[in-house]
Image (cartoon, grey):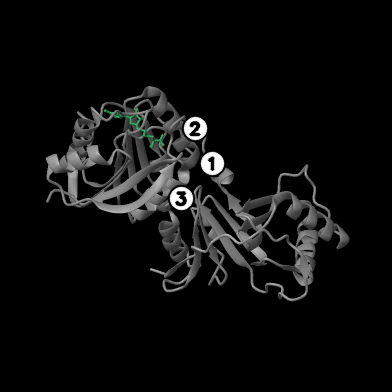
Amino acid sequence: MAKLRLDKSETKPSKPARETDESPASVAPGYLLQCAPGLAKVLQKELNFVGATSRDQKLFVKLQRNHDLIFANKVKSDLRLDEIRTAEMVLRCPAYGRFKISQRQLALMAETLTHLGPRRLVVSVAGQVFQRQDLARFLTKSLAERGYSFDDDVEDEVWMFCIDESWYFGLPVFKSRALRDERASEREGALPPTIAAAMAFASVPRAHDVVFDPCCGSGTLLAEFHRYAREAKLTGVDIDPHAVKIARKNMEILVGETSDTEGLIAGPHNETRLTVGDSRTQTAPEGLTLTLANLPFGVQFGDRASNPALYRDLIAASLNSATPEWRGMFLTSDTESFAQSVRDLAVTPPEVMFKVKIRGELATCYRIKGRS
Ligand SMILES: C[S@@+](CC[C@H](N)C(=O)[O-])C[C@H]1O[C@@H](n2cnc3c(N)ncnc32)[C@H](O)[C@@H]1O
């Protein structure tokens, strides 16, 4: 695991961006990655997994209220960066620095953008050092002087991302919108795809996995798992017929096949079955190696009074079909109900894989490995 350098520095007093010749233009591009708050460590492992960074590489990590950020100024390879699923956004940064923006950096920005064509400017500022509108005006004027004009009418973006005194001039490798475009429809309360991806990635996906989501909703977890292990056999069940309808549509788009009347989607590499049912009383798939579940919690799904029994029954159904290599990944913010249900079931002590904020609410992803 690479060492994280957490920046806990105080925000500095306001200083406007200004041109200077002192700071050198960045030579190799850096990469700025943004993920949901709590996912920095998982994202860092995914960066290693796609060969972008090495295990002992020091990365700049900034934990903010609304997201975690990672900056890597030396990547081994950027070839597979667009495969990253746990990041909401990845920016390739040909220029970056602290406080000052040099003449050479402005020239590099203008040259890069002239080469790329029309872009609109998005400025994001956290902290007291930069002022969003001043910075936008400064960049617009400075780049116009160098022959490049931003175009607000185009969709393609260039970002100026500022956190306290650090600034990153970045071009999106992809954005979460691009990930979401692969989904046919969304359901209110669905797990954000990057968090589903973090659960799937942290489960250490295997091609031969037999995966079960007993409360699959719109199928986000299974869809993300499929992207990591296309051959794995997937089964999803939800008590809500509307949710299952959405899950089928989403999975059909991903696999490129339609479902039959039984909810089976037979793709070229795998088989996915999505059905309506009560998972407390259903038999989990035979040969089960992995359960992935975003357990009902919060105001929309589930309630604290009935959750302990519901969680116990949902987990017990998986344990009854579990093979020796089984692991269960469970996400909930109702940690008390989860603790009570695993006590009742006498399973191996749950390991905390990560904690993440979902729409402002803190949820914990646990892994259990079977009965103790
Ligand atoms: C937190 S949501 C899951 C959201 C899902 N991960 C998604 O991205 O859409 C919990 C789901 O559990 C389902 N559920 C609740 N009780 C259930 C039961 N007994 N059997 C099956 N599904 C159940 C709800 O209908 C709801 O869709």
Given residues 139 and 205, the one toward you in this image is 139
For marks 1 and 2, give the CA distance: 9 Å
Ligand 1 visible in quadrant: top left
Badge 1 vs badge 2, beta-carbon distance below 8 Å: yes
For marks 3 and 1, give the CA distance: 19 Å
Image x and y of residue 55, in percent? 42, 71
Given residues 232 and 147, the one toward you in this image is 147
Badge 3 vs badge 1, beta-carbon distance below 8 Å: no
Q: Amino acid at mark 3?
A: Pro
Given residues 125 and 327, the one toward you in this image is 125
Name the outermost residue toward the top.
241
Give the residue pinned by disc 2: 186
User: Quick one: label 3 or label 1, which is nearer the N terminus?
Assistant: 3
User: Image quarter for residue 170?
Assistant: bottom right
Label 2 secondary element? loop
Give the residue pinned by disc 1: 180
Which class describes the residues within 10 Å of circle 2: few (<14), some (14-19), or many (20+)? some
Image x and y of residue 151, in percent? 80, 47
Residue at (47, 49) in percent of width and height: 36
User: Quick one: label 1 or label 2, which is nearer the N terminus?
Assistant: 1
Please, is residue 34 above or below residue 112 in the view? above
Q: Amino acid at mark 1?
A: Arg
Residue at (40, 48) in percent of width and height: 356
For marks 3 and 2, give the CA distance: 22 Å
Give the residue pinned by disc 3: 37
Which of the two discs, 3 and 1, sits closer to the camera? 3
Residue at (26, 26) in percent of width and height: 278
Label 3 secondary element? loop
Residue at (23, 27) in percent of width and height: 306
Please, is residue 306 above or below residue 138 in the view? above
Label 1 secondary element? helix
